Image: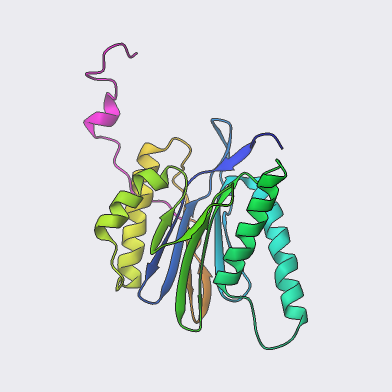
Amino acid sequence: MRYPYVTGTSVIGIKYKDGILLAADMGGSYGSTLRYKSVERIKAIGKHSLLGASGEISDFQEILRYLDELILYDNMWDDDNSLGPKEVHNYLNRIMYNRRNKFNPLWNTLVLGGVKNGKKYLGMVSMIGVHFEDDHVATGFGNHLARPILRDEWREDLSFEEAVKLLEKCMCVCLLRDRSSINKFQIAKITEEGVTISQPYALKTNWELSAFKNPSKGAEGTW
């Protein structure tokens, strides 16, 4: 594939006191058209990991097929051990870098979070295989709009309620500023007890701000 067709926008991930939270909207854009509005872009991977993806939806589905095979092969060993988030993150990095070197990249940026043996893990992998770990990560426009908020307000001891509130604040900013975002979100949680992915829901928004009513005011040469 030379370029992506149907794409999803930002994914935001943060650590909190008990585990990891990931958030993403459910929009799928065909160019600049919001063609699909029920695309799930956060999935559980094995027992210990969550994966969120922005970018090409069909490539994300291809990555999920790779991961299904990986988890199945790991389970076949039947050795009472299972792949943790760090191992899955390293595997994804190899997949993305390998495809990039073949000039046939998977057009995604991935967020991988998980908890195993009491240790929280959160990382990101880009389309070209650049990867890192952090306490909070974001893809797409979220990297520009949400990360500044997270740098100011994130704490290691956030409760679940505080972490959800912080994520919703970030998602609301992305919704107001990113044309590819829609007001239909999911938040996924992973702890030692397991994975929970919320039902889709909408955020309260306020479009009455003067900057939204007349965005070109004071800008010469605009329509």
Using residue 147 as the reference point, say whether residue 113 is left or right of it. right
Which color mode does the image show?
Answer: rainbow
Residue 223 is situated, as x and y percent measured from the top left of the image, at 34, 13
Using residue 117 as the reference point, say whether residue 219 is left or right of it. left
Say above or below: 51 vs 179.
below
Q: In this view of the protein, which residue sits in the foreground, 44 or 111?
A: 111
Total marks placed? 0
Q: Quadrant of residue 19?
A: bottom left
Which residue is drawn at the image coordinates 36% and 63% (left, top)? Answer: 164
Magenta-drawn segment = 201-223
Identity of the residue furthest to the bottom in this view:
80
Which residue is drawn at the image coordinates 24% and 34% (left, top)? Answer: 209
Q: Is residue 208 magenta?
A: yes
Q: Is residue 58 visible?
A: no
Say above or below: 211 vs 91.
above
Which residue is drawn at the image coordinates 72% and 68% (left, top)? Answer: 70
Q: Quadrant of residue 205?
A: top left
Say above or below: 31 vs 25.
above
Q: Is residue 132 visible?
A: yes
Residue 202 is situated, as x and y percent measured from the top left of the image, at 42, 51
Residue 101 is situated, as x and y percent measured from the top left of the image, at 68, 46
Residue 156 is situated, as x and y percent measured from the top left of the image, at 31, 71
Q: Quadrant of residue 179?
A: top left
Q: Is residue 86 magenta?
A: no
Identity of the residue furthest to the front in this view:
101
